[in-house]
Image: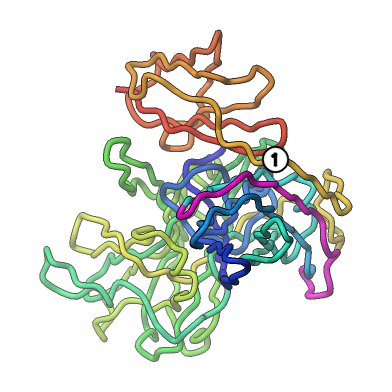
């Protein structure tokens, strides 16, 4: 199941604008998506291999020069740079060039390109590079990011990027008129997404949650339980709604000096998700304080301040123990979600079942999305104009559920579906991915 949120690795982008013959381009966004969307966006840096089945590279850039760029070329490169043990990787795996038509002054191009599954066929760290050249092959701008494909680990960051802390005690509850961390029941977590696009491994059983415990003596004596809560999205307001607890630990853990300044991993052994696995959907992963701490603080976690530059607003959450509301906040705590071992690897670097591409250079012309959807909004019947029968497509609701429907004689029928926002996603034969948002009233 492909989800609505855009998936980004915990990427640090660097962008250099170069001027040449008055042609000037600035890359405004370069990310790896779970699928084609631009809504709620948790930042991920470590991706379980089962979640790499279908990915989309997204490059957004703007002509900031003083004249029209008559033609240009985009180039995407994906390289495997190191394996899980830190040894050198297998190098360049995929390269794709897209030739662009003329770009007007201040025009913004937003290009999305599906990644071949075979390009992510090793465990370890990958580097994705983006380049924009003009017709004279002069580099106008470039950027890159890295991410890791793992066996079982799913997290936003593994490193403390600064000594800045985050946790419930740093926030103020305006309803109770007190700071967090002073009562039992404080909760703190961040948004994760399970795509579950393939059904080969249906369980997706969470086994543990990891937290970077800040090296702060006020953490000593704090007692917590790791927990996972199910999440839905309000179709009208597009706001996150945090629901019932689906997994936790039977036994609370008390922080002592031996775990300060370290990544602490606590087991998950209770809840529906332990028996049924995590279904496709959104989840908040974090902890709950089980005792009031005498120092008036709750657990302080390390904060990924670099990842926050790409983290959309309001995808981490805090809950005060005597309150009844989750509050969204912009901090990015270092929290990891770990699953059971999907594969028996025997020490090998390959992902099972899938072959690997050699260096594959593809060239194509950029084509803007030609299909249109009308009426939009609609009461249920949408006309899809200029849609070609050989194009692959899917329709998803706002929660990422795949909607079983067909385009027949150019019409898409959602009459039997509830009112709300839907995403029509179309992939062309060349691999370009285009989407249209549809609203059913």
The residue shown at (26%, 59%) is 327
In-front residue for pair 76/242: 76
Tell me which segment is drawn in magenta.
84-106
**Horizontal and vertical percent position of residue 63:** 52, 57
Query: Residue most toward the top?
Result: 409
The residue shown at (57%, 66%) is 22
In-front residue for pair 165/114: 114
Q: Is residue 318 left or right of residue 336?
A: left
Q: Is residue 262 left or right of residue 420?
A: right
Residue 84 sits above or below residue 364 on the image = below
Which image quarter: residue 183? Answer: bottom left
**Horizontal and vertical percent position of residue 46:** 62, 62
| Quarter containing the C terminus | top left
The residue shown at (78%, 69%) is 81
Residue 295 sits above or below residue 306 on the image = below
**Residue 281 colored magenta?**
no
Q: Secondary structure at mark 1?
A: strand
**Horizontal and vertical percent position of residue 220:** 39, 86
The answer to whether residue 14 shows anywhere in this view is no
The residue to which callout 1 is attached is: 365
**Horizontal and vertical percent position of residue 234:** 31, 39
Which image quarter: residue 314? Answer: bottom left
In-front residue for pair 46/296: 46
**Residue 104 colored magenta?**
yes
Label 1 Cα neighbours within 10 Å, binned few <14 / some 14-19 / many ≥20: few
The answer to whether residue 36 shows anywhere in this view is yes
| Quarter containing the N terminus | top right
Residue 111 sits above or below residue 298 on the image = above
Q: How many marks?
A: 1
């Amino acid at each position: 199941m492909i989800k609505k949120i855009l998936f980004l690795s915990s990427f640090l982008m660097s962008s250099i604008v170069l001027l040449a013959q008055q042609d000037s381009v600035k890359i405004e966004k370069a990310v790896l998506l779970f699928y084609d969307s631009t809504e709620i966006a948790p930042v991920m840096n470590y991706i379980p291999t089962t979640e790499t089945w279908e990915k989309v590279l997204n490059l957004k850039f703007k002509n900031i020069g003083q004249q029209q760029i008559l033609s240009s070329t985009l180039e995407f490169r994906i390289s495997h740079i190191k394996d899980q043990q830190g040894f050198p990787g297998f190098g360049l795996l995929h390269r794709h060039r897209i030739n662009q038509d003329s770009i007007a002054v201040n025009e913004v191009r937003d290009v999305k390109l599906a990644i071949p599954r075979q390009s992510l066929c090793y465990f370890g760290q990958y580097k994705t590079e983006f380049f924009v050249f003009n017709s004279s092959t002069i580099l106008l701008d470039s950027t890159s990011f890295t991410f890791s494909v793992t066996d079982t680990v799913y997290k936003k960051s593994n490193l403390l990027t600064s000594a800045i802390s985050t946790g419930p005690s740093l926030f103020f509850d305006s309803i109770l008129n007190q700071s967090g961390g002073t009562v039992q029941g404080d909760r703190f977590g961040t948004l994760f997404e399970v795509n579950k696009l393939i059904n080969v491994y249906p369980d997706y059983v969470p086994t543990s949650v990891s937290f970077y415990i800040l090296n702060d003596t006020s953490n000593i004596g704090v007692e917590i339980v790791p927990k996972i809560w199910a999440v839905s999205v309000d179709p009208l307001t597009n706001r996150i709604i945090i629901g019932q607890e689906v997994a936790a630990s039977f036994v609370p853990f008390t922080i002592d000096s031996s775990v300060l300044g370290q990544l602490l991993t606590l087991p998950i052994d209770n809840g529906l998700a332990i028996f049924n696995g995590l279904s496709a959907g959104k989840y908040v992963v974090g902890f709950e304080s089980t005792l009031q701490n005498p120092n008036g603080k709750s657990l302080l976690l390390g904060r990924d301040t670099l990842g926050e530059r790409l983290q959309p607003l309001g995808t981490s959450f805090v809950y005060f123990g005597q309150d009844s509301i989750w509050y969204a906040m912009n901090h990015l705590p270092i929290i990891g979600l770990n699953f059971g071992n999907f594969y028996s690897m025997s020490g090998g670097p390959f992902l099972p079942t899938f072959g690997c591409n050699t260096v594959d250079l593809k060239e194509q012309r950029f084509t803007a999305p030609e299909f249109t959807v009308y009426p939009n909004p609609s009461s249920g019947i949408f006309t899809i104009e200029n849609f070609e029968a050989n194009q692959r497509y899917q329709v998803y609701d706002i929660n990422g559920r795949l909607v079983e429907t067909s385009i027949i004689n150019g019409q898409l029928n959602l009459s039997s579906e509830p009112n709300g926002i839907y995403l029509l996603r179309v992939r062309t034969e060349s691999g370009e991915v285009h989407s249209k948002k549809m609203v059913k009233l």
